Amino acid sequence: MKIAVSGKGGAGKTTVAALLARALEAAGRDVLAVDADPNATLAYALGLHEPEGITPLAEMEDLIREKTGAEKGRYGAYFRMNPEVSDIPERFKLVSGRVSLLVMGVPARGGAGCACPEYVLIKNLIGHLLLNGTEEMLIDMEAGLEHLARGVTEKVDALLVVLRPDRASCLTASRISDLAGDLRIRRVLGIGNAVRSQRDKTYIAKTAADIDILGFIPWCDEVQEYERKGKAAFEIPRMREGIEDIIGKIVEVAHA
């Protein structure tokens, strides 16, 4: 199962990706979690020790030079467009239980696109993992629509959109769904996050009616406190119960 997790900034995309990873682990599965957000915080959400010491792959100048033959940030220079990347996961993944983490660090520089060697390296690596990976794979994408416009998520089994019960989040989710259709992504699924009431659930379902909402994660005041202490939100009983109710549906739909 290969799932890309998307949504508007602030919707809780990274927290949900971490919850899914830990829920799959608790179900006895091996998981590869990929942080493809320029603002890489998935390690924190997973509760890894000392995540501030992690260097994203896109910032490893020696690796970029080794794989592409070009210096990081060299726009318009000649470099390998199809670098060999199969050895990278074993060299650089961080392991926590049955969850392995790769921090990509996709270039955040506006307009970089495919014109720089680090972006080409990361895009090729994600493509390799989607085609050849044997673990369950979760990709925490950058917030918003940019990753879809770049065509990074074409090979996923499903695109999972995280929505909060507010208009901006739901409208962004609908736009993401439209773009996913243009890229022929087979399934667009949704998870409502930070839900306080039945009214919130109804609002999400109505405003994002074009998305198959699989379930809802409750609002929880403890999440921020747990993350401040370096603990994963999955350790909170009500958060764990909320995501465990959803995980079976995601696996079933993704494999259908």
Image (tube, rainbow, N blue to C red):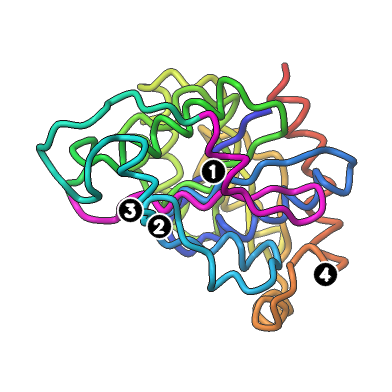
Q: In the image, which is nearer the foreground, mark 3 or mark 4?
A: 3
Q: In the image, which is nearer the foreground, mark 4 or mark 2?
A: 4
Quadrant containing the C terminus in the rendered view = top right
Place of residue 231 in the rendered image (x, y in percent of width and height, measured from the top left): 74, 74
The residue pinned by badge 3 equals 61
- At 88% from the left and 49% from the top, the residue drawn is 26
The residue pinned by badge 4 equals 236
Q: CA distance from mark 1 to mark 4?
A: 22 Å
The boundaries of the magenta stretch are 86-110
Helix, strand or loop status at disc 1: strand
Disc 1 marks a residue whose amino acid type is Val
Place of residue 138 in the rendered image (x, y in percent of width and height, measured from the top left): 62, 41
The residue pinned by badge 2 equals 168
Helix, strand or loop status at disc 4: loop
The residue pinned by badge 1 equals 161
Mark 4 or mark 2, earlier in chain: 2
Q: Are marks 4 and 2 in contact (CB under 8 Å)?
A: no
Mark 3 or mark 4, earlier in chain: 3
Disc 4 marks a residue whose amino acid type is Ile
Q: CA distance from mark 3 to mark 1?
A: 33 Å
Circle 4 crowding by C-alpha within 10 Å: few under 14, some 14–19, many from 20:
some
Q: Are marks 3 and 2 in contact (CB under 8 Å)?
A: no
Q: Reply above or below: 189 against 72.
A: above
Mark 1 or mark 4, earlier in chain: 1
Q: CA distance from mark 3 to mark 4?
A: 39 Å
